[in-house]
Amino acid sequence: MKKIYRLDEIDCANCAAKLERAVGKIDGVKQAEVNFMAQKMTLEIDDSRAEAVLAEVKKVCAKLEPDCALIG
């Protein structure tokens, strides 16, 4: 399953890269891409665990970038 989220309040390209690396390590995430200029995160995730994986993605995002929100 492919999901695209808008990132609200991502501050810099370094923050986007840090977020991309952390989300990419989550079990169930096949691919993660964060585009700082477009303020978007594209995820390819395991369909069978989609809800749990998305919850973990939101938790990681809140931990690394507390001011950033995933809107999707």
Image (spheres, grey):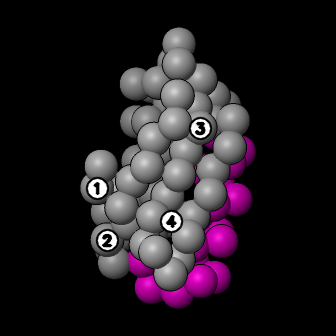
Q: Say which label, 4 or 2, has the lower sequence index.
A: 2
| Secondary structure state at the residue bearing disc 2 | strand
In the rendered image, residue 40, in percent from the top left (x then y), is placed at 45, 64
Instruction: Identify the residue shown where x is 52% and y is 36%.
Output: 2
Which residue corresponds to mark 3? Answer: 44
| Secondary structure state at the residue bearing disc 4 | helix
Query: Image height check: is 29 above or below 8?
Result: above
Type of the residue with mark 2 = Asp
CA distance separating discs 1 and 4: 16 Å
Q: Are marks 1 and 4 in contact (CB under 8 Å)?
A: no
Q: Which residues are magenta?
A: 10-26
Query: Image height check: is 56 above or below 6?
Result: above
Instruction: Identify the residue shown where x is 53% and y is 13%.
Output: 48
Type of the residue with mark 4 = Leu
Q: Say which label, 1 or 2, has the lower sequence index.
A: 2
Q: Is residue 25 left or right of residue 57?
A: right
